[in-house]
Amino acid sequence: MLNECETLMLDMDGTVLDLAYDNYVWKELVPEHYAEAKGISVDLARSRLYAKYRAIQGDIQWYCLDHWSERLGLDVLELHRGVNHRIDYLPGAKRFLQALHEHDVRVLLVTNSHPDTLALKDEVTGLADYFDAIYTSHQFGYAKERQEFWHALQEEEGFGKGSTLFVDDNRTVLKSADAYGLEMLVEISQPDTSEPVRETSDYTGVMGVADLLDT
Ligand SMILES: [Mg+2]
C-alpha cells in the first residue's frame, strides 16, 4: 500500500507513539491527583472521571488540556510533563519513519493531540523532524471524528482521496475518514504495548506502522 500512495497520513498517539503513556496519565495519574485534591478514594475518583471522559469522548474538548485543567482544577500539562520519561515510540515506528525517506511520499502527522502535548512529545522524541507537515485538529476546531475536520484539512492540503493512505488506532476516526471518502485505511492493532493486541475490524489491520514496509 505504501508504494501506491502519494500522501501518507499518520496519527500520533497509538500509531507512532505508544499509547501506554497517555493511558497511564489519564487512567492512573490524573485519578490519583484528582482523588487527593477532592479527598476521595482513587477508585471513586476514577469512576467519576471515566464518566466525565465518556460524556465528551470524540469531541474536540476531550482532547483539550485547558478544558481538563479548568474542569478538574489540576494542571494537567504539568502532570504530563512530570512523567515525560514514559513517552516513547511504538516498536519499529522510529525505524519506519526513517525508512520513509526512501519513498516518494508526502508524510503528514494528523493528530487530535493538544498543541502542548504535541510539543512535549516532540521535545522528548524529535518526531516532528520526520514529517513534511503537522496538523492538529485543534487548529481547525473539530476533532478527526467530525467531517468538518476532513473538509478543513482538504482545504489546506488538497490531498487525493484515492491516493492517500491514512493510519490510525481509533475506529471512530477511521470511520470518519472512510465516510469522507479516503480509500486506503489501516488500523493499528496494538496501540498500547501494555495492553493485548486488539481484534481486527473492518479495516486492514497491522500490529504497528513498521508492518507497512512489508505490504
Ligand atoms: Mg491515536
Image (cartoon, helix red, strand yellow):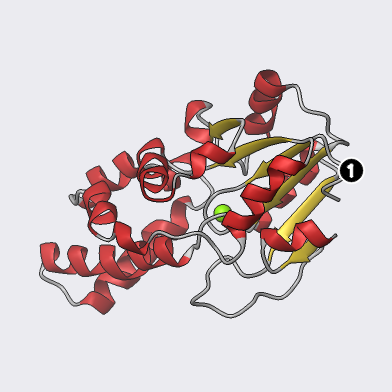
Residue 203 visible in the shown view: no
Q: In which quadrant of the rendered view does residue 3 lie?
A: top right
Q: Residue furthest top?
A: 155
What type is the residue that disc 1 sits on?
Glu
Instruction: Judge from the rendering whether residue 186 lies leftward or rightward of residue 145; answer left or right.
Output: right
Is 29 above or below relative to 170?
A: below
Q: Position of residue 128 (x, y in %)?
A: 50, 38
Instruction: Judge from the rendering whether residue 136 lies leftward or rightward of residue 77; answer left or right.
Output: right
Q: In which quadrant of the rendered view does residue 46 lie?
A: bottom left
Q: Residue at x 88, y 36 (%)?
A: 162
Q: Secondary structure at mark 1?
A: loop
State the residue in front, 199 or 87.
Answer: 87
Q: Position of residue 141 (x, y in %)?
A: 50, 29
Task: Give the position of the C terminus as an image quadrant.
Answer: bottom right
Q: Position of residue 96 (x, y in %)?
A: 66, 54
Q: Position of residue 60 (x, y in %)?
A: 48, 40
Is 141 above or below relative to 23?
A: above
Instruction: Judge from the rendering whether residue 12 lies leftward or rightward of residue 63; answer left or right.
Output: right
Q: In which quadrant of the rendered view does residue 117 lie?
A: top left
Instruction: Judge from the rendering whether residue 197 lies leftward or rightward of residue 214; answer left or right.
Output: left
Q: Quadrant of ligand 1?
A: bottom right
Q: Which residue is mark 1?
A: 4
Q: Residue at x 18, y 49 (%)?
A: 73
